[in-house]
Image: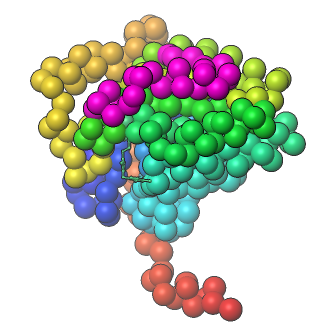
Amino acid sequence: MQRLFLRNEIHGTVHLYGGQQAVAVGDCSALLDDDWVAATYQGHGAALARGMPPEALAAELMGRSTGACGGRAGSMNIVDLEHGLIGCFGIVGGSIAAATGAGMSAAREGRVAVAFFGDGAANQGYFHECLNFAQVMRLPVVYVCENNGYGEFTPTDAVTAGGDIAARAATLGMPAQKVDGNDLEAVSAAARAAVANTRAASGPAFIEAMTYRHVGHSKSDPGAYRPEGELDKWLERDPLSVVRARLDEKQAAEAERVVEERIERAVETALAAPYPEAAMTRAREYAP
Ligand SMILES: Cc1ncc(C[n+]2csc(CCOP(=O)(O)OP(=O)(O)O)c2C)c(N)n1
Ligand SMILES: [Mg+2]
């Protein structure tokens, strides 16, 4: 997606998920098909982990008509109800509110709703209001904070009183875990515990996944605020390397071959797809 952006195939901006993949994959691995997920403007990982075909994601990022939302949502606002993705949100903390709302119907239907959100959202009003509401109403929502150490250009520590986001959820009385967000197995184990507890007891749970984004927040952010050496330190513990180390060479090479081919195919298909019709034509069709 980085290369496609540089080739002008992605219009506007894109918020890359690189470095945080284990959070979406690990958490979604604990869910059933009927469960709901709301994610952020970087929700591409969650979309794929829920089962969105890579073709539909690639085409959506490139604004093509074969995209998950017909090319009209773009990179930030993807929705795919068929795969339980109720939305990706450009509004910081929007996913928290959406998943809490979904939790109200999920409670009646035996489902679970998951909110992925960044550390930046932990200082938004939504966070406090929704977590309190979910705990009081015993809603089956799992809140997953992707703490990558920065909210856009701002170090999280500098703007987060008390410093411990999971502790905020714990004071409300919900089970709260802090987990190595770059370790797929650790995230998956935490998610299984949280989801099982939530499904059985119909009350919320909280996971704070400690992770790092490899690039700036969006394409207008070169990430220059990061101290020298910090990225290198995290690259040594990249979630893909952590997983790779647990596979033997043959398994790893085979997995890489399959994934690379799948991505190539998705991108080629998306590039060959047309753009949607002009917006005004469609707007007229929908006019009363
Ligand atoms: C309600 C709202 N306020 C402000 C913004 C502008 N904004 C976009 S991203 C961001 C920081 C969010 O922090 P985090 O979720 O940690 O994002 P990260 O930089 O890790 O991607 C802000 C303040 C916004 N999109 N929505
Ligand atoms: Mg962040």
Q: Is residue 254 above or below residue 24?
A: above
- How far from the left and from the top, in percent, is residue 162? 42, 23
Residue 117 horizontal/vertical position (percent): 50, 39
Q: Residue at x 66, y 19 (%)?
A: 175
Within the image, what quadrant is residue 128 found in?
top right
When the figure is inspected, residue 72 is found, relative to residue 213, above or below; the finding is: below
Point 80% across, 47% down: residue: 105
Decide which of 91, 130 is in the foreground and name it. Answer: 130
Q: Is residue 166 magenta?
A: yes
Q: Position of residue 232 (x, y in %)?
A: 20, 20
Q: Residue at x 74, y 42 (%)?
A: 103
Identified at 55% across, 46% down, the residue is 126
Colour scheme employed for the rendering of this structure: rainbow
Q: Nearer the viewer, residue 214 or 54?
A: 214
Q: Which residues are magenta?
A: 155-179
Question: Can residue 188 be seen at all in this image of the molecule?
Answer: no
Q: Is residue 10 above or below residue 164?
A: below
